[in-house]
Image: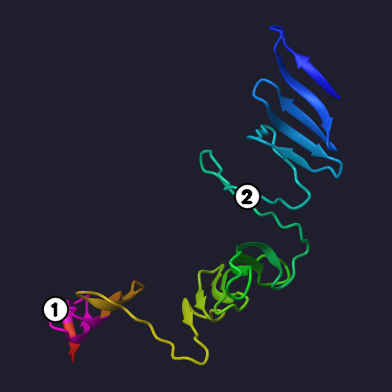
Amino acid sequence: PALVLVDSDHNSDFNIQASGGLLNFNDSTNSATRISIASDGTVDVNGNLDCNSGIDVTGAITGTGDVTITKASPILRLADTTDPQTTNGSIGKIEFYGNDGSSGGADVRSFIQTISTNSVGNAHALIVGLGESNAAPSEKLRILGDGKVGIGVTPSTTLHLDSGGTPTTIQIDSDTESSIDFNDHGGSAKRYKVGTNLSSNDGQFEIKDMTANAERLRI
């Protein structure tokens, strides 16, 4: 059975039909089903769904297409409802899932997460997790709210590195100068550079006083 909606020019533009356990809203003119409602409440929309007043979802959202937000200064917000928050409690998490089952099976390969770092919910950290050799992803990078950055460790300084049981190495590559710039802009401003090829491109290692523009050590 179907309810046919005919407009003033006598073309049956739409019809509502119960078929195969589905309630379908059909575009008769283009021979297409636009909306299907199943007995379990599942709603399939074939085409774009425009919601000018927003859309509220209490269950999971599963999609097979891309997500695009088009507006001036768009925001994608994950809103946590936990109150009070706990230490290491998750504020929000985005997981990247790989479906390649040829090696280790389909699983989460990496994630980005914000956690609370105290029990009152006013200090937070941003975490990046990665997995390797089929291992579940674990924390590799942590940025604290005060700007400290840790790779392999919770940072106690501005930049804190810990590679565990392997050597911790910082590699700086360049075709000319490779250097670290120390710039103290406090009460007694002073700037030094440590690196290679600071004064000339002769392959030398230098410590250079940049404030006085004077080389202090050369190897």
- What number is the disc on residue 22? none
> Dot 2, crowdedness within 10 Å: few (<14), some or many (≥20)?
few
- Say which of marks 1 and 2 sits in front: 2
Q: Which of 64 and 31 lies nearest the eye of the viewer? A: 31
Judging from the image, what secondary structure is the residue with disc 2 in?
loop
Coloring scheme used: rainbow
How packed mark 1 is, by other alpha carbons closer than 10 Å (few <14, some 14-19, many 20 or more), is few
Lateral position of residue 85 relative to residue 127, left or right:
right
Q: Quadrant of residue 2?
A: top right
Residue under label 2, please give it: 64
**Place of residue 193 in the rendered image (x, y in percent of width and height, measured from the top left):** 26, 79
Marks 1,2: beta carbons within 8 A: no
Q: Which residue is labeled 1 in the image?
A: 201
The three-letter amino acid code for the residue at tag 1 is Asn
Residue 123 in sight from this viewpoint: no
Q: At label 2, which amino acid type do we have?
A: Thr
Residue 33 image offset from top left, x and y in percent: 71, 31
Callout 1 secondary element = loop
User: Residue 12 vs residue 182: left or right?
Assistant: right
Q: Quadrant of residue 186?
A: bottom left
Can residue 78 be seen in this snapshot? yes
Q: Residue at position x 70%, y 33% from top? A: 53
Q: How far apart in space, not on screen, are marks 1 and 2 (Cα)?
A: 54 Å
When the figure is inspected, residue 126 is found, relative to residue 202, above or below; the finding is: above
- In magenta, the rendered stretch is 194-214
Image quarter where the C terminus lies is bottom left
- Residue at image point 44% right, 91% down: 167
Residue 169 % position (x, y): 40, 86
Q: Magenta stretch: residue 184 in it?
A: no
- Would you place residue 17 above or below residue 116 in this image? above
Task: Identify the residue at image location x=16%, y=81%.
Answer: 214
